[in-house]
Image: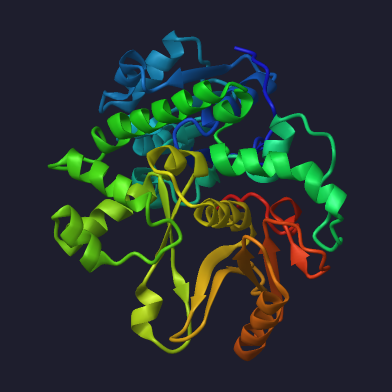
Amino acid sequence: MSIMIVKRKLFSEVEKYLEDKQAIVVTGMRRVGKTTLLTYFFDKIASQNKIYLDLEDPLNRAIFDSENYEEIKAELTRRGLDFSGKAYVFLDEIQYASNIPSVVKYLYDHYSVKFLLTGSASFYLKNLFSESLAGRKVVFEMFPLDFEEFLQFKNVSYTPPAFAETVSQTTHLFFSPFVSEYLRWGGMPQVVLQTDVEKKEAILRDIFSSFFQKEVQVLGDFSKNSTVRSLILLLSRRVGQKVDLSRISQEIGVSRQTLYDYLEFLSGTYFVSLLPALGRDDVAVRKQRKLYFEDVGLFSILDEPPFGSRFENSVLLNLRGGGEMYYWQSKTQEIDFVVKGMRGEINAFEVKETATNSDIKKLSKVADKLGLKNYHLLSHNFVPDKMVKYLFQLPDFCKPAAGR
């Protein structure tokens, strides 16, 4: 099952756990590259005592229907797996088989089996796996390509400047066409690899259709799927804005609680990202979350978003590997993004289409007042100032989230 694969950053993180006993679980949005990752490691493992099953196929899913787990083991044996030695079991789209956690736990505890699992809905996977596989798993989240990976997929050999470097206008001009493409079409691997614009749009529409049919309609179990569709369209016009539950619930005709459930589902299935506030004084303000999409290309086909929304959304998607993300909000002051690292360090980022000296002074003043020592101004357009950074120049701490 070998295919041409471009290695992503997450591959190296997953590989660290390949020889451990723990099950590896990779979750993320549809078509983001989870199956490619699974294929890569299936081919990489030298042992022939391995099996790959796509659980979206009902015939493969039927293997796990039995409540007798020894019968499941027997069926896997009939398919060529030898449980007398170390075996490798690769399962794709595990959200379709609700008893997978208990099956994995049984085989994990009684036999020498290494599991590598993928699923497209953290909304379900996190609940199913949280207790049943405690201490037996390591979980990774896979997202669309960040800008550095995007350049890799585009075969751009020129290395982006380091975060500490000053960017010349020549360097900015070199990267600008790639930034423009990334901001328009996003980071879904299949879209990035496609060169035809009409086909790019067709792929994105197919991804949205697949998400709606297989996540919303199958996993969501909502009484009115059309209302969820209306909500998604409405949200595409509110990227980067605070989510006003009262106002949106009135617009789509549902209760606040129902709207909250819809939003949690869309967040849990990796369609949108809800960014919490970090503030000091107003509890009501801190409860408000800002809305972003998990891929810029997807909300770009739903609406014609202003450039600023696409740029701000893309910055968020490239910063999130650095730790917990928030926006800073008080009654009178706001900073677009705050990243809290694992060691407690805090980095603040303000995003502007064209940064000015006034923006630099304002950010410096706000950051000093709030006690934030590390603050950065990100600009899309070129600014001849060493303090200004760019999308292709994000800090080194923006790495894939470690397993947990």
Q: Residue at x 24, y 45 (%)?
A: 230
Image quadrant holding the N terminus, namely: top right
The answer to whether residue 99 is seen in the rendering is no
Please say if 270 is above or below 152. Answer: below
Display colour scheme: rainbow
List x then y, in percent, for residue 201: 48, 28
Q: Residue at x 43, y 35 (%)?
A: 119
Residue closest to the eye, 97 or 112: 97
User: Horizontal placement of 135 versus 205: left or right?
Assistant: right
List x then y, in percent, for residue 293: 45, 49
Residue closest to the eye, 330 or 217: 330
- Say which quarter of the image contains residue 24: top right
List x then y, in percent, for residue 259: 22, 57
Residue closest to the eye, 350 or 307: 307
Please say if 225 is above or below 279. Answer: above
Residue closest to the eye, 243 or 258: 243
List x then y, in percent, for residue 154: 71, 30
Q: Residue at x 16, y 61 (%)?
A: 250
Q: Residue at x 63, y 14 (%)?
A: 48
